Image (cartoon, rainbow, N blue to C red):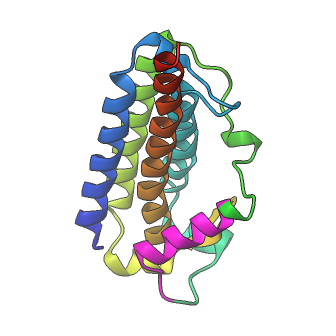
């Protein structure tokens, strides 16, 4: 994917998730099955994961190069990055403490959505200063996946929100099953 396609996918996937979570009533927003995160916690997790990316992209490129190095390989494709992430999850990988949300109340939803939208705007603006070559040159650390090029980090961000939307929907199918059995 080229930069314009990446930004478009980021917008589409995050909007889909936000719209879905925004459509939930309070019971669904707060529902947890088998100690899985609620929809509110899923939303907060996405917010927590976007903020560091928006922040690190603010730094001048020479600082990124000095702090994290440069890529010594080509960027993985979106599909290859997604498969690597899924394998890590299947191997027991989880979000580290910094990305685990506390309990979220429904009245926090609007602010979290606004924070996500603000982080996305910062990511678009800051990553927009990168050329296609820059996206493949500079690397960033990921707590589960290790060193990723900026392009790969953006691919991860696209898949990550989609993954959490799917988890949220699966979790909420359980509330429907429970309600239909009553």
Q: Is residue 40 above or below residue 81?
A: above
Q: Residue at x 63, y 69 (%)?
A: 87
Q: Is residue 129 above or below residue 74?
A: above
Q: Residue at x 48, y 9 (%)?
A: 107
Q: Is residue 46 above or below residue 10?
A: above
The part of the image, by quadrant, that contains residue 105 is: top right
Q: Residue at x 52, y 19 (%)?
A: 181
Q: Nearer the viewer, residue 72 or 62?
A: 72
Is 18 on the left or on the right of 70, as rendered?
A: left
Q: Please, what is the dominant secondary structure of the magenta stretch?
A: helix
Please give the range of residues in magenta: 74-89
- Give percent across and percent down for residue 91: 73, 65
Q: Nearer the viewer, residue 21 or 181?
A: 181
- Give percent across and percent down for residue 39: 51, 28
The part of the image, by quadrant, that contains residue 9 is: bottom left
- Give percent across and percent down for residue 33: 63, 29
Is 35 on the left or on the right of 167, as rendered?
A: right
Q: Residue at x 48, y 77 (%)?
A: 80
């Amino acid at each position: 994917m080229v930069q314009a396609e990446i930004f478009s996918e980021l917008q589409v996937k995050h909007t889909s998730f936000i719209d879905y979570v925004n459509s939930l009533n309070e019971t669904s927003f707060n529902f947890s099955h088998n100690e899985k995160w609620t929809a509110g916690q899923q939303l907060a997790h996405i917010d927590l994961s976007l903020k560091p990316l928006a922040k690190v992209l603010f730094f001048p490129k020479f600082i990124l190069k000095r702090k994290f190095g440069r890529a010594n390989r080509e960027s993985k494709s979106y599909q290859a990055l997604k498969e690597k992430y899924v394998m890590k999850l299947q191997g027991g990988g989880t979000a580290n403490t910094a990305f685990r949300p506390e309990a979220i109340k429904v009245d926090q939803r609007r602010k979290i959505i606004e924070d996500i939208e603000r982080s996305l705007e910062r990511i678009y603006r800051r990553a927009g200063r990168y050329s296609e070559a820059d996206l493949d040159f500079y690397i960033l650390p990921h707590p589960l996946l290790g060193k990723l090029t900026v392009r790969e980090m953006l691919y991860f961000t696209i898949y990550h929100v989609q993954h959490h939307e799917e988890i949220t929907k699966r979790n909420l199918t359980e509330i429907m099953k429970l309600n239909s059995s009553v």
